[in-house]
Image: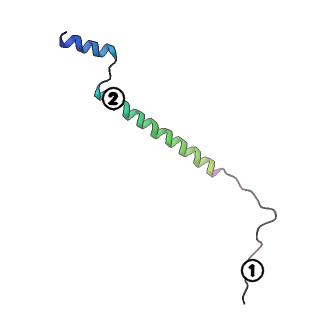
Amino acid sequence: MDNQEIENYIAASRIRTGRRRKRDARKQYDKQLLQYNRKQKELWQAWQNRGYTELTPPVMKGYIRYFV
């Protein structure tokens, strides 16, 4: 086999080169960062919209000072 046939075989057999492997790893890392960012936004929205629950009766009315 000469060099051209080897290159054609590699191209046709989908063997990943080192460059392609690094590029794919970088893409996966970027996708993971985007996923974390979406999750963080979702959690932040849930925190912002957590609502308000009024206590009945209130736990404390006013401030009382006691001195001895």
User: What residue occupies the far right of the structure in this picture?
Assistant: 57
Which numbered disc flags the more N-terminal residue, 1 or 2?
2
SS label for mark 1: loop
Check the image and report above or below for 10 versus 61. above
- Quarter residue 8 falls in: top left
Q: Dot 2, crowdedness within 10 Å: few (<14), some or many (≥20)?
A: few
- The percent position of residue 67, horizontal first and vertical second, equals 72, 88
20 relative to 30, above or below: above
Q: Residue furthest front?
A: 1
Q: Quadrant of residue 12?
A: top left
Q: Position of residue 16 (x, y in %)?
A: 32, 23
| Screen quadrant of the C terminus | bottom right
Q: Name the amino acid type tagged 2.
A: Arg
Residue 51 in magenta? yes
Disc 1 marks which amino acid? Answer: Ile
Residue displayed at 50% across by 43% down? 37
- In this picture the colour scheme is rainbow
- Which residue in the structure is indicated by mark 2? 21
The boundaries of the magenta stretch are 48-68
Of residues 1 and 28, which is closer to you in this image?
A: 1
Spot occupied by residue 46 in the image (x, y as percentages of width and height): 63, 47
Q: Main secondary structure of the magenta part?
A: loop
Can you identify the residue that label 1 sits on? 64
